[in-house]
Each structure stands twice: as C-alpha cells, then as structure tokens.
Amino acid sequence: MIRSRGLAASAVLLLVTAAVTLLAAAALTGCNSEEYVVAKIAPTQGNTATGEIRFYKVEGGVRVVGKLEGLSPGLHGFHLHEKGDCSAPDAMSAGGHYNPAATPHGAPDADSAHRHGGDLGNLEAGADGKAPVDRMDRVLVYENLVGLAVLVHANPDDLTSQPAGNAGPRVGCGVIARR
Ligand SMILES: [Cu+2]
C-alpha cells in the first residue's frame, strides 16, 4: 500500500518534470514553432552587409525578425523589392519596391494606402555595425512574400521622397524563400 503510493507519487513527479521540460524547450525556441519564410542577406559588390531576416506568420500580420551586420553605423533603408533576383553586382536586378497596391512610398507604420507593401522603413546599425530587427508589420501578407527580395541600402530612407525614400545604393540583398 505504502509502496504503491510511492510509485504513484514518482509517476506524477515524472509527468510534472516532463511537462516543465517541454514548456522550457518551447520558451527557448521562441518563434520556432511558428511558420516563417526567410531571406539570407548577402553583400553587394564592395559592401559587407550580411544577415538573415525571418518573416513569421502571426495574428494580424507578419512579424519581421532578424539581424544584419557589416553595416555602417546609423539608419539604412530596408525594403522588400519586387523581383527575387540579387544577381546584379549592385542588386539593381531586384527591381523597384514591392508595391502591389500602386500606392505612394511611405513609412512602415502608415496605413496600406500610404506606403508600399514593401516599405519596411529603416534598420538602425549600432557602432558595431549590427542592426537587429523585431517588429510587427500589419500590411504585409505572409502568403505573398516568397520570391520577393529584401534590400538594405547605404543611406536612410527619409520615408517621404518618391518613389523610394532616397536611400541610396543597395548594400545587401536576399530572396525570401521557404525554409
Ligand atoms: Cu529599397
């Protein structure tokens, strides 16, 4: 009697331990249990920008998460461009901004009538050249992302100049693909 109660207690303890372990693993992996597509960013000729940007399907839009490095400190225009082609040395092969609704260029927090679909604004690199990003985008449609290009520019996007924010040369480029 005492012995079987001990066994039952051990079984409960094992189950609790297993549940806690699973929860901890889920917390550690964060977004990994969710659906995402990803772009590996490579530098254009003469530049050093590298990194990875993931686009997670989340409630109400797309969560943009990742990190660029090898940038000059400060702001860098950050956009989705319409052609998934980074083959040109200056990445001009990626075409213009992804702009499915033919709207004017704008800030990423503008509503869908006042920004391009691909207007992600700026990344900000620190003194170490690293620019982390983790933000929610409510205009992007997850299902439309594969095949678009992610571009990082040499200069800040001023968020107003047409058609592309006057962000200067393209320093990094990657194509969004399924993982
Ligand atoms: Cu751009």
Image: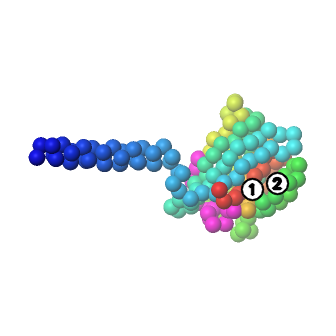
Q: Dot 2 corresponds to which residue? A: 86
The magenta-colored residue range is 134-146
Q: Residue 36 shows which numbered tag? A: none
Residue 27 left/right relative to 80? left
Q: Dot 1 corresponds to which residue? A: 175
- Which residue is at a point 62% across and 63% down the rendered structure image? 142
Mark 1 and mark 2 lie on one chain; the one further toward the N terminus is 2
CB within 8 Å, label 1 to label 2: yes
Residue 105 left/right relative to 93? left
Residue 23 left/right relative to 83? left
Name the foreground residue: 128 vs 50.
50
The spot of residue 150 in percent (x, y) is 73, 53
Magenta stretch encompasses residue 113: no
Whole-angstrom CA distance, mark 1 to mark 2, is: 7 Å
Way the structure is coloured: rainbow
The spot of residue 48 in percent (x, y) is 80, 38
Q: Amino acid at mark 1?
A: Val
Image quarter in which the C terminus is found: bottom right
Residue 108 visible in the snapshot: no
Which quadrant holds residue 115?
bottom right
